[in-house]
Image: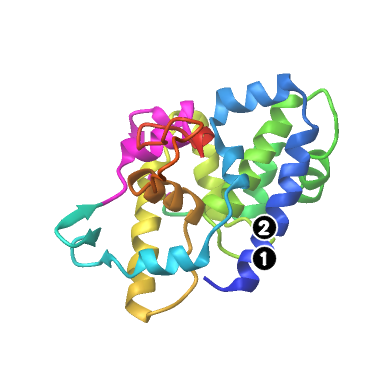
Amino acid sequence: MRNEYLDKVEYNAAELRDIWAQWDDKAKQLFYQNYGDLPYLLDIKVDKHLFRAMVQFWNPAYSCFTFGEVDLVPTLEEYTTLLRCPKIQGNKAYVRAANLPNFIKKLMMITGMSEQWAAARIQQKGDDVKRRVDVLALSIYGLVIFPKAMGHIDEAVADLFDRLGKQNTTMPAIIAETFRSLNACRRVGEGRFIGCAQLLLVWFQSHFWKVDNVTPSHPRPSPESSLRCY
């Protein structure tokens, strides 16, 4: 993963963290109820050295990480547990529509206003808390869940986000994009990972947790833990 891209992600994540910090408990609880622990992804920094080392163990032929005689692969259940997303626990898988509307129309449908208005509205303390919650969630999805081009939310992301309210699960799409990007990185030898690197690293650390001689001050996170434990 290129340093300049990670720097830009961190800069934009810091802006979203500042917005989140300004919200009151009512708005935050509404966000948790609708989108789970997505904001915790903003606090996770990507260790590029660890990530590059981890990618070398990805086995494209079997779509899993191979460590000696041990095979590991992220599962839908593990990712769902980490994110704790209520709406992501539906029983319908998200399937990308054949003909997507352009991003501007989709964002206007989600927010009810223009893209410029949405960007400004998220920083305001208006009465429409639910709308601000939706726009922030869309921003997190575009920045860390399905990153494409910096400063632009891909139309497929907006389409997926719109379907969350219909009890579709995004987990198959997140897992599929992770596998596709890992395969691409292994094929070309190096390249930008277009997927949720933060979530993949947390999953990895839940399986490979360094235990020091000193008794830890808090319980060891595990695959059954949510993002709040990291």
Q: Amino acid at mark 2?
A: Glu
Q: Which residue is at a point 40% across and 35% down the rendered structure image? A: 80
Spot the residue most to the left.
69
Image-based side of 2 in relation to 10, left or right: left
Disc number placed over residue 7 in the picture, else none: 1
**Which residue position holds label 2?**
10
**Farthest-out residue, front:** 213
Q: Is residue 113 visible?
A: no
The residue drawn where x is 67% and y is 58% is 10
- Whether residue 77 is visible, yes or no, is yes
Q: Are marks 1 and 2 in contact (CB under 8 Å)?
A: yes
Q: Which residues are magenta?
A: 73-97
Vertical comparison of 148 with 168: above or below: below
The spot of residue 164 in percent (x, y) is 50, 34
Q: Nearer the viewer, residue 19 or 210?
A: 210
What count of labels does the image hold?
2
Q: CA distance from mark 1 to mark 2?
A: 5 Å
The residue shown at (62%, 45%) is 43
Report the residue at 70% width, 38% height from top: 111
Closest to the observer: 205 or 86? 205
